[in-house]
Structures are given as C-alpha cells and as structure tokens.
Image (cartoon, rainbow, N blue to C red):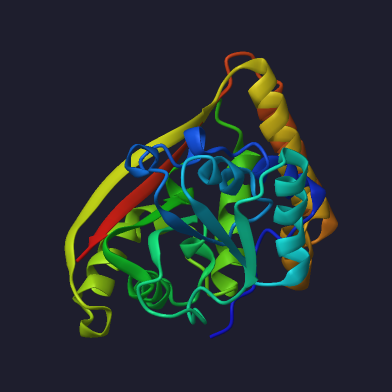
Amino acid sequence: MSNRYTHGHHESVLRSHRRRTAENSAGYLVPHLSGDQDLLDVGCGPGTITVDLAARVRRVTALEVSEPALQLARETATAAGVANIDFAIGDAQHLDLPDACFDVVHAHQVLQHLADPVAALREMIRVTRPGGLVAVRDADYHGFIWYPAVPGLDRWLELYQEVARANHAEPDAGRHLYAWALAAVGDASTGSAAEVIPSASAWCFATEADRSWWSESWAARATESDFAEQAREAGHPDTELAAIAAAWREWGASPGGWLLIPHGEVLIRTQ
C-alpha cells in the first residue's frame, strides 16, 4: 500500500511544524545525545527539530520523501547557519542505506502516516549501530482532550480519522508504538534489541496566545490544506469544512479553553 500524507505542506501546516523543537518534541531522546554520534532524522519536515538535534550530535542526515519537502529543511538549516546536516530523499519503509551506519535514528510524527509502520521500524533498527538508539514519537488523535465541549470539534475528529485511514494511516499511532516496536524487534531480520523503553508526554495549549495560534492553524487546515482537499475528494462539502473551521475558532476564543495532545514515545536500544 502506498502512503499519502494527510496534512500536506500548506503554510498552515508548516506554521505548526516549525514550532517544534528538540525540547518540546524530543525531550525523551535529548538526554541520550552526545557529540560523537551520527543521527538519521526520518521525515524531518521543515527541519526545526533537525537543527536542534544537529547542535547535540556530530552529524545529522535529514531524510524526506521528496525534494520539495527536503528543501524546506535545507532552508531552515541555512537560515540557522547549521553546517553539519546532510540531506537525502528516501522511503522510511525501504531505506536505501547500509546496515549499522547511524548511532541514533529519530522519527517524529512519522509512523502515523505510514501504511506499514513496523516495516519502517525494522529498517530504522537495521541501519542503527549496535548499542545505538531508535527513537520514535507520535500523537494519538482519539486521546485529544479539549475544553469547553465544542460539538464541531467532535465532527472534526471523526472526519480527520476518516481521511487519515483512507490514506492507510493510523491517526492513533501513539498507543500503538510500543506494540509496533516489539513486533519490529521480534523480527529476526533486524537482529535483536537489548530493550524497548516506552514512555509518553503531551503538548498543552491553554494560554490565550497558544489557543489563538493552534485554533487558527487548524481552522486554515480545515478549509485550505491537503487535508481539506482530501475531505472534498471523499464527498464532504465546503459548508461542512467551514463549520469545522468555525468550531476551531470558537474553541480558540473561549476563556479558559484548554487542549491536551498525548504522545506515545519509544526508545529501542540495539545490540
């Protein structure tokens, strides 16, 4: 099965992705990084996490599925003056890389978009050196919690699940990461792993500034992004998408509004 990226690269999506840093999106990995490591960043997106990781290791290879997507990371690295990043195009489920060539392999919000996340984990393990780490983190959409209750957001979640699953994706990937990792480790083709360490963390949007930023991001995504186009292709009218956008803005304008986004995390230590 092929993969279709549910979010796409509309500016409303990129605004969200560019707020990601190693601290707010890879905190479970950061304590394990050192200046003598080579790191592969799978699905690097616009590269803000990549640049932060590059400051902590010897060298990073940033991987994306296409040249236009990879160019976003190049631009971020150039603007930050970071020179220890290489750039490559590739498929996470079929890495065109030799065995045991990285100390750390990192993927943030990637497995949820893949038709075969276990295959991708097997590949990540394969290219990791003995004693190295594979680090993956993904959100869990059904675990989103928001206040106040806005019925339009219930409809947004239903529609997002529908669109993502039509793309052979798993929007609730966070709760599956540990099981996927155990399945990948158990495959003899990857060798064995010393340990699989599950954890979890969350993003919280509650201040007026954060609510405004997040709600406007998703309001635009609901009507302008690739997600919106895919919803239209599935037969959902513009009036429905506009109502979802309005629901996001209603939540964003709510005093005391609060949103929690849970994430599953896994570290796999190879041997």
**Residue at the limit of the structure toward the left, as seen here:** 194
**Residue at the limit of the structure toward the top, as seen here:** 255
The answer to which quarter of the image holds residue 191 is bottom left
Is residue 121 depicted above or below 147 in this figure?
below
Residue 9: percent from the left, percent from the top? Answer: 75, 57
Task: Name the side, left or right, on which 196 lies relative to 59.
Answer: left
What residue sits 54% from the left and 40% below the top? Answer: 55
The answer to which quarter of the image holds residue 234 is bottom right
Task: Name the side, left or right, on which 233 lies relative to 40.
Answer: right
Q: How many labels does the image show?
A: 0
**Residue 24 appearing in the image:** yes
Closer to the camera, 186 or 131?
131
Closer to the camera, 165 or 128?
128
What residue sits 28% from the left and 73% below the top? Answer: 184
Is residue 188 depicted above or below 205 in this figure?
below
Task: Name the side, left or right, on which 132 lies relative to 19.
Answer: left
**Residue 243 appearing in the image:** no
Residue 83: percent from the left, percent from the top? Answer: 66, 49
Residue 193: percent from the left, percent from the top? Answer: 19, 66
Closer to the camera, 87 or 120?
87
Residue 259: percent from the left, percent from the top? Answer: 53, 30
Is residue 150 depicted above or below 218 in this figure?
above
Q: In which quarter of the image is the C terminus?
A: bottom left
